[in-house]
Amino acid sequence: MDGFTLVTRADEIPGWFSNEEADAIARACPPEGILVEIGTWMGRSTAMLAERLPNVRIFTVDSYPETAAARKYAQDGGHPTGDPAGHAAANLAAYPNVHRMLQNSIEAAKTWSGPCVPVDVLFVDGEHQREQIENELRAWRLYVPAGGWIFLHDGKNSGQWAAEVVPAAAAVLVPPEWERVPEAEAESLLAYRRRG
């Protein structure tokens, strides 16, 4: 793609997602399941998951607003991103199982195909604001069947982001319908499974 450098290894794409976190999510996903990711940015986590889950359909949702996380990254000396959507398009072009949804995550949930297309794994890593996270969880949890998973990035060991993510998850993913599964977590990931 013109103006964008194609990264040949997923873990070389700029971002905050680790191999350990990718492995944890990959272990939870059925071999031919459906994974929805909220928050694409430059495509690091999407590509890492696509490499591990080549037979899983991955839908990654991002409307590319300027987020607090992106501003903090730039302030902390992170590399310039220019056009993260363009970088993501270049970085994800090699993965035929990745489907980009360039829209607001709440609007994307409204247009999802419902119970006919269950979401085996939902991975939330968008705007790290409590109200937004709660709204995303309320909108998308409806599509996660019994035995399905929700992972939230930056829920542990991530300071200010955990202060937003943890209470949002606790407010929406409540027992007895949802259970937190610490043994499925890695680094900053929180893991919840729908009982049933």
Image: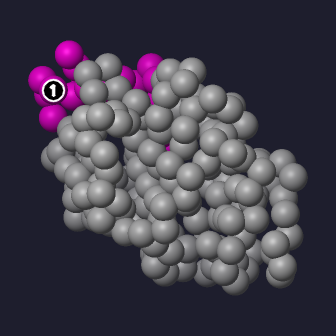
Q: Is 50 drawn above or below residue 129 in the view shown? A: above
- Give how far across and how far down residue 150 sits, in percent: 36, 37
At 30% from the left and 65% from the top, the residue drawn is: 107
Q: Is 195 drawn above or below residue 107 in the view shown? A: above
- The magenta stretch spans which residues? 174-196
Task: Give the amino acid type for the residue marked by disc 1 in the picture.
Answer: Glu
Q: Secondary structure at mark 1?
A: loop
Is 153 left, or right, of 169 in this rendering?
Answer: right
Q: Is residue 170 in view?
A: no
- Give how far across and how far down residue 101 sits, in percent: 48, 61
Is 92 left, or right, of 175 in this rendering?
Answer: right
Q: Residue 106 falls in which quadrant of the image? A: bottom left
At 32% from the left and 20% from the top, the residue drawn is: 147
| Quadrant for the C terminus in the image | top left
- Give how far across and how far down residue 184 sits, in percent: 46, 23
At 61% from the left and 81% from the top, the residue drawn is: 75
At 49% from the left and 28% from the top, the residue drawn is: 33
Image color mode: one colour
Check disc 1 and report the residue beneath it: 177
- Give how far across and how far down residue 126 sits, in percent: 44, 61
Q: Is residue 26 in view?
A: yes
Q: Is 38 drawn above or below residue 18 in the view shown? A: below
Residue 184 lies in magenta, yes or no?
yes
Q: Is 50 drawn above or below residue 14 in the view shown? A: above
Q: Out of 95 and 67, give the one closest to the viewer.
A: 95
| Quadrant for the N terminus in the image | bottom right
- Report crowding for label 1: few under 14, some 14 to 19, many 20 or more residues within 10 A (C-alpha): few
Q: Out of 131 and 99, give the one closest to the viewer.
A: 99
Residue 102 lies in magenta, yes or no?
no
Q: Out of 30 and 42, give the one closest to the viewer.
A: 30
